[in-house]
Image (cartoon, grey):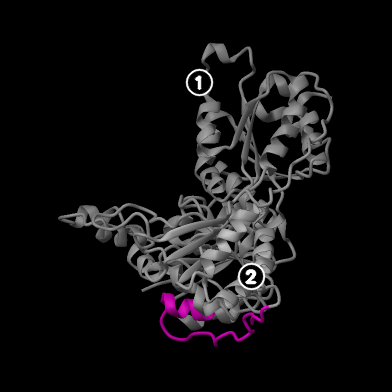
Amino acid sequence: MNGAESLVRTLVGGGVTVCFSNPGTSEMHFVAALDRVPEMRCVLALFEGVATGAADGYARMTDRPAATLLHLGPGLANGLANLHNASKASTPIVNIVGDHATYHRQYDAPLTSDIETAARPFSGWVRTSPDARRVAADGAAAIAAALSPPGQVATLILPGDTAWNEGSGPAPVPPVAPPSRVSAEAVRAAAEALQAGETSLLLLAGPALRQRGLELAARICAKTGAKMLAQTFNRRIERGAGRMPIERIPYPVDQAVNALAGFRHIVLAGSRVPVAFFAYPDKPSLLAPEGTSYTTLARPEEDIVHALEWLADEIGASKQPVEPAKLAPPAPARGAINAVNLAQSLGALIPENAIIVDEGVSTGRGFFPSTRHAQPHDWLQNMGGSIGIGMPLATGAAIACPERPVINLEGDGSAMYTIQALWTQARENLNVTTVIFANRQYAILRHELANVGAPNVGRKALDMLDLDRPTLDFVALARSMGVPGGRAEDMDAFNRELARGLATPGPYLVEAVIG
């Protein structure tokens, strides 16, 4: 058994059974090993950013890592934007990068680069296997590293000769320690902050945004009079009927500052101190008022749900009555396509147990209120801010949960970063309905141009923010990659097309033209 097969069998034995791949010459022995290990599903992506983003979506829905297979430094570079997003989301990924054979690197062939240095800012763990006998053990260590709480990208670099020379056979994955429990002092401090008699906020992230965590947080807030909010961007929120409703801190700085203006105490449950996404002239970086006190109940790597259980017991809130959202979807909207009407129709048409992947950017900011009473669903967001995650994230989520409908809410500018994901969706016959919000511009950057106070904005500057001349035809692009679709220019057409997409086996694309 060579090193490559030893590694693949180690991955499968460690629960890593899907590999999102864009291989090259250095990875051919890994590719060949896939034929000998039927338990490993390998999914081809036409761009490395699709592979890394799909691994993110898969892990968010399964709580276990997928592998990626990338080709040397340039292939890694193509996938780094979505590895950045995965890193910010604490997503476990085993990121395998091929390299030149150990004896060939000294000759500085055209594809030679310092892969370790390129990988480190986006990985929590990086290692290069020195020889074929070590590959399996290094792969097992990568799985354990990826699963280390709260999750991280583990990059394993595989020189060509370590793949084709004789390996050790599969290696066992070392034990992974569970999330550590918080201290009694942290629980008491959080209880004091929430019961201080001043306005308090319980700020949630990570596992606290799933059903059990949300229920506990709601009981705690009902008992103490505190309010609960989620971070602006989150890995996964369980929402809809039967779940405890929660709002997020708004993205625009002025709105975020207003939302946090009344709080004297903020208790962090897996979340970080709220900061502005960017710096703006004459606007604060910290969003809460000066003098706000912060108390950490649980850090992201700690057992957040257990901390909430302990806190609920501490203050006598374990049986505090709370009321989850009721199923009360709005009627589908009529009239012109705009953000408000789109939100209303989504609230009406989201199917039960759907997965919503939100990269709607400007258009999608107001979608939460109208979807609060929709069918139960999961909502996935871009935590790293590098656009082009939506289509790959939806691809990985659909492979993770083939029985669940996936709706990808996608800005037109963001879509063009990784539109090759449609081809993978067609090839794998994935149950993804992609909704493109076609406003024909980088609308968010038009807002940002005003927010930063850029002077003397003229035609040349605005041309950098418009997606016209020529106008993108997303229905034609989708069809060219094997995905059927339709265009909607009013809400009646949008409602029909979204319903058709959800009823169509395999992928479908709806282009919603925003006037």
Of the residues tagged 1 and 2, which is closer to the observer?
2
Mark 1 residue element:
loop
Of labels 1 and 2, earlier in sequence is 1
> Mark on residue 110?
1
Residue for badge 2:
315
Residue 399 figure quarter: bottom right
The numbered disc on residue 329 is none
Residue at (65% x, 55% y) in the render? 184
Q: Percent from the top left, x then y, of residue 35?
A: 81, 37
> Horizontal and vertical percent for residue 94?
67, 39
* Residue 345 covered by magenta stretch: yes
- Looking at the rendered image, the quarter that the C terminus falls into is bottom left
Residue in the picture at 46% in, 68% down: 364
The residue located at (55%, 27%) in the rendering is: 116
Place of residue 464 in the rendered image (x, y in percent of width and height, measured from the top left) = 29, 52
Tell me if 408 is positioned left or right of 166 in this view: left
Which stretch appears magenta?
Answer: 320-346
Q: Secondary structure at mark 2?
A: loop
How many numbered discs? 2
Q: Is residue 403 above or below residue 113?
A: below
